[in-house]
Amino acid sequence: MTTQQVADRLVELCRKGQIFEAQEELYGDDIACTEPSHSPMPFTQGKTAVIEKGKMFASMIEERHGGAFGDPVVNGRFFCVPTTLDATMKGRGRQLLEELSMYEVKDGKIVAEQFFY
């Protein structure tokens, strides 16, 4: 798949709420995930570890009120997707989370992701 095809497929699945399915299908086995330094897990390596980190985050959501995945912007082997999540987080109350997610694609798989929030 091209970078555009990977980007479109990721957004398609995420908009359906199939985030873990998207990761299983599109992530490379040795994916690297980088988050801001204030994150509890600023760096995670490997598909299994990245998926587990996502499940841990999902378990912190008490109630989802809304959210959106924007259209991907593709440049070469990279693409970005703006996202929002309106959710009540366990022990933290309702929050509007805004994020820019950047991805790198090689050989039809996402090999790196970085989140800016």
Image (tube, helix red, strand yellow):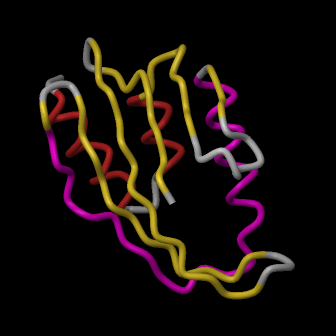
Tell me: 69 left or right of 57.
left
- Return the residue found at the far front: 37
Horizontal and vertical percent for residue 95? Answer: 62, 82
Picture layout, residue 64 above or below residue 105: below
Q: Nearer the viewer, residue 76 or 26?
A: 76
Q: Is residue 27 magenta?
A: no
Residue 45 picture quarter = top right
Q: Nearer the viewer, residue 20 or 36?
A: 36
Tell me: 39 left or right of 65.
right
Q: Quadrant of the N terminus?
A: top left
Residue 27 picture quarter = top left
Horizontal and vertical percent for residue 53? Answer: 70, 42
Q: Is residue 53 magenta?
A: yes
Label total for image: 0
Picture layout, residue 111 above or below residue 59: above
Q: What residue range appears in magenta?
A: 47-74
Tell me: 84 left or right of 48.
left
The structure residue drawn at horizontal position 59% and vertical position 47%, both measured from the top left corner, is 36
Picture layout, residue 9 above or below residue 71: above
The structure residue drawn at horizontal position 38% and vertical position 30%, both measured from the top left corner, is 26
Picture layout, residue 57 above or below residue 67: above
Horizontal and vertical percent for residue 8? Answer: 20, 45
Tell me: 112 left or right of 71.
right
The structure residue drawn at horizontal position 56% and vertical position 35%, both measured from the top left corner, is 34
Horizontal and vertical percent for residue 116? Answer: 47, 53
